[in-house]
Amino acid sequence: SQQGEEDPQALSIQEGENATMNCSYKTSINNLQWYRQNSGRGLVHLILIRSNEREKHSGRLRVTLDTSKKSSSLLITASRAADTASYFCATDEAGNMLTFGGGTRLMVKP
Amino acid sequence: DAGVIQSPRHEVTEMGQEVTLRCKPISGHDYLFWYRQTMMRGLELLIYFNNNVPIDDSGMPEDRFSAKMPNASFSTLKIQPSEPRDSAVYFCASSSRGSSVEAFFGQGTRLTVV
């Protein structure tokens, strides 16, 4: 079953703009992860944020976590055409296994 | 390490046939996960293993699905008999410490049952 839910389901922006995707989950977590999936490929880990962290950065990626609202956001700054992909959040709500949301399909137009 | 290796990459089979999907996890990873991805249902966890032992198979849709991990470097997911609704992309992933660290995914097996 899917625990995390991403919003929006699809996002189309111009190259150079910022892209923000949101994720909500239902119960308590120890960590939340974001993954990227290019068309026809496997998922690639982007960033992990633990429940005692509020914000984390990795290159052009910024992730925030609000445990009181059970939500997280992924911000991609200065987007590039190569960022076109689906982005998923995943939580450890169910224990030792990751449960994934439905994903956000991001299209970055050159 | 070459990463998680899945085979075959594509499989087309007729309804009623047996299908076996294979996975080689990253060496040293104690956790192995099988996921199924469809447009309708997204990414679903089917089963996961810890130290070659199945821990949670509650996501396995029916008795037609079975998974084994005979050793630390090999796992199979078998569907017998296969049905058209089993058509999906099946992913194998491994991690060193369950869900507390990143998981590494294989490239997936695209299964089409006709």
Image (cartoon, rainbow, N blue to C red):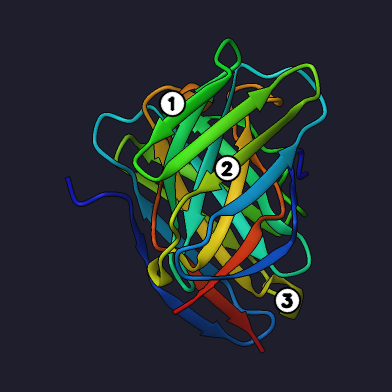
- Looking at the rendered image, the disc whose residue lies closer to the viewer, 1 or 3, is 1
Which residue appears at 39% of the width and 63% of the height?
B107
**Considering the image in quadrants, where does the C terminus of chain B appear?**
bottom right
Q: Nearer the viewer, mark 2 or mark 3?
A: 2
Please, what is the three-letter code of the amino acid marked with disc 3?
Glu
Q: Quadrant of residue B69?
A: top left
Q: Mark 1 touching mark 2, by CB under 8 A? A: no
Q: Residue at x 58, y 18 (%)?
A: A54
Residue B101: assigned label: 1
Q: Quadrant of residue A19?
A: bottom right
Helix, strand or loop for disc 3: loop
Residues packed near mark 1 inside 10 Å, few (<14), some (14 to 19) or many (20 plus): some
Binning the other alpha carbons within 10 Å of mark 2 as few (below 14), some (14 to 19) or many (20 upward) gives many
Position of B58 relative to A37 (above/below): above
Judging from the image, mark 2 belongs to the subunit labelled: A
In this rendered view, identify the residue nearer to me: B90 or A72: A72
Chain to which mark 1 belongs: B
Q: State the SS at label 2.
A: strand
Residue B16 position (above or below residue B33): below
Q: Which corner quadrant holds the N terminus of chain B?
A: top left
* Residue annotated with mark 3: B83
Q: How far, Cα to Cα, is label 2 from label 3?
A: 38 Å
Q: In the displayed structure, would residue A10 be above or below residue A23?
A: below
Q: Position of residue B85 (x, y in %)?
A: 76, 74
Relative to A52, is B22 on the left or the right? left
How far apart are the two marked residues, 1 and 2, measured between alpha carbons? 18 Å
* Residue that numbered label 2 is attached to: A74
A2 lies left or right of A43: right
**A34 or B39, which is in the foreground?**
A34
- For residue B9, above or below residue B22: below
Residue A39, x across and y down, in percent? 49, 72
